[in-house]
Amino acid sequence: MDSKITIKGLNLFFGKTQVLKGVNLDVYRNRISGFMGPSASGKSTLISVINKLVFFEEAVRTEGSVYIDGQNILGNGLSDVALRKKVGTLFATPIPLPRSIFENIAFGPKLNGTWKKSDLYAIVEESLTKAFLWDEVKDRLDDSALKLSGGQQQRLCLARTLALKPEIILLDEPCSGLDPISTLKIEEALAELKSEHTIILVSNNTKQIARACDFVAFLYLGELIEAGTTDKVFTYPDAKMTEDYIQGKFG
Amino acid sequence: MGKPHSSRETGIKWLLTLFALSSLLFLFVIFAFILAEGLPLFVKVGPGHIIFGMKWAPTKGHFGIFPMIVSSFMVTFGALVFGASLALACATYLSEYAGRKTKLFLKPALELLAGIPSVVYGFLGVVYIVPLIREYLGGPGFSILSTSLVLGIMILPTIISISFDALMSVPAGYREGSLAMGATKWQTVYRVVLPAARSGILASFILGMGRAIGETMAVIMVAGNALKIPTSLLDPLRTLTSNIALELAYATGDHRSALFSTGVVLLVIIMFLNLVANFWVKKRTAR
């Protein structure tokens, strides 16, 4: 199996507090990997290292390395901006920019120098289609994105991420505020998207992880307890703690 | 709730209502007073003579304040060009780039600027800015330029603190989303944060403008108070406010009324600016 991301001996500190403790993990190409664990397990912090947004916090220090396609992103080789064009992120609360639906998706491509209306339109249509939103908004692309429902806003945020053609998509509890039907639509979209992207899904919902993911990593208080295929971890977990978490004995 | 309590509660409510209304009463009294003193002259010599008249010789029947209206707008505009750009840069730095500790120290320090009495600003202007302009750029030094600089500094705290609040109220998710889409920090600030805070920033400019147009003491000290339309940045000028402050002590009869007419014009201009500012702020909160 082909690794897209390889994390080696990753420690992360906020000031004196250690939030990630010696994490070693492979994330495989064209698969959906789930990160699960109770709150303060470090799963969200881990993905904010992969997109390097964590470095906007104060007093952050890391040790170890994170390789994407063999290049250490914590080294000096790759600029943060270039990295974030490779790695798209979807947040827990969908917050579209206060612009039209069209402009929200065109924002990223415009930053990259695509200004021709017809090119932008093609990107917008393609991205919205992949995010399962095109049919619902194709007649009102110029409406404010803030008028969409929560579930639609999250799919809009997925679409604007897709517009950048990222190799990796990080989803930080993308369905925590959504109803079951909207959640299902996001999961459907992800299943289609994995043929072209490497996907990491962070979720508190173990059922969602079991449904949507090929691989799963279980974190607890900043340590990686266990990682493997979803079938393996959910049926024969190595660690007692993993078993307890999956069965809902703590969380 | 017990009976004795509720009658006391009602009493307190009425008392507070009365106090609250009294401030409205002050506003009304000021308006009525200035209009009563100033309007008769408008009727007597005609509003055109006052507003568009070029000559101010109130003891000889010339009540033209057009040069002062123009001068007031000129220095206000100058103050905005200088002060607003500096203040916006400052607010942007504070909200987007400064660390938490810098923010904690700088914000109150800048707000201290608002507490310095205007006579001190005027004093510094006379002692430093006016001589510098006279020496290096020519003219008397008392000028549009010196007045604009002093006013520009005076409006900094107003604009900084209001536009800072506007920038801080932009949801963190806008910044996160923009950065996650591969925008640089500056692209995020310029294309997402500043536009999102636009109406608050505009409102801060207008409030700063109101402060600049109403300032009197510092302006008297650095403007030179000449009675003509200035034709260069280095010419002295007299504003509406300084006109009232300079002459009221010895004015009688129509001269005195003319000063109140100046006040009416000033009041109308400031009311208009406040209305526009309120409109913008309302539009922002309604969104």
Image (cartoon, coloured by chain):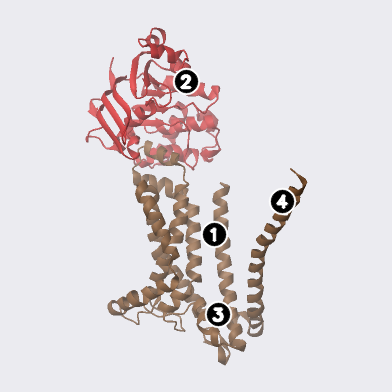
Chain colours: A red, B brown
Q: Give the label, 3 or 2, closer to the camera.
A: 2
Q: Report whether mark 3 lies on the same chain as mark 2.
A: no
Q: Which residue is mark 4?
A: B9
Q: Amino acid at mark 4?
A: Glu
Mark 4 chain: B
- Res. A165 visible in picture: no
Gap in Å between the C-alphas at discs 4 and 2?
A: 52 Å
Mark 3 and mark 4: span between their CA atoms? Answer: 56 Å
Label 2: chain?
A
Q: CA distance from mark 3 to mark 1?
A: 27 Å
Left or right position of B178 against B277: left
Q: Are marks 3 and 1 on the same chain?
A: yes
In this orientation, does residue B38 appear?
yes
Tell me, for residue B277, which label it has, or none: 1
Q: Chain of mark 1?
A: B
Residue that numbered label 3 is attached to: B52
How many angstroms separate mark 1 from mark 2 (CA)?
48 Å
Give the mark, 3 or 4, whose residue is nearer the N terminus.
4
Disc 2 packing (10 Å; few <14; some 14–19; many ≥20) = some
Q: Are marks 1 and 4 in contact (CB under 8 Å)?
A: no
Nearer the camera: disc 3 or disc 4: 4
The quarter of the picture where the N terminus of chain B appears is top right
Question: Is B137 located above or below residue A102 in the figure?
Answer: below
User: Which badge, 1 or 4, comes first in the chain's sequence?
Assistant: 4
Q: In front: B246, or B170?
A: B246
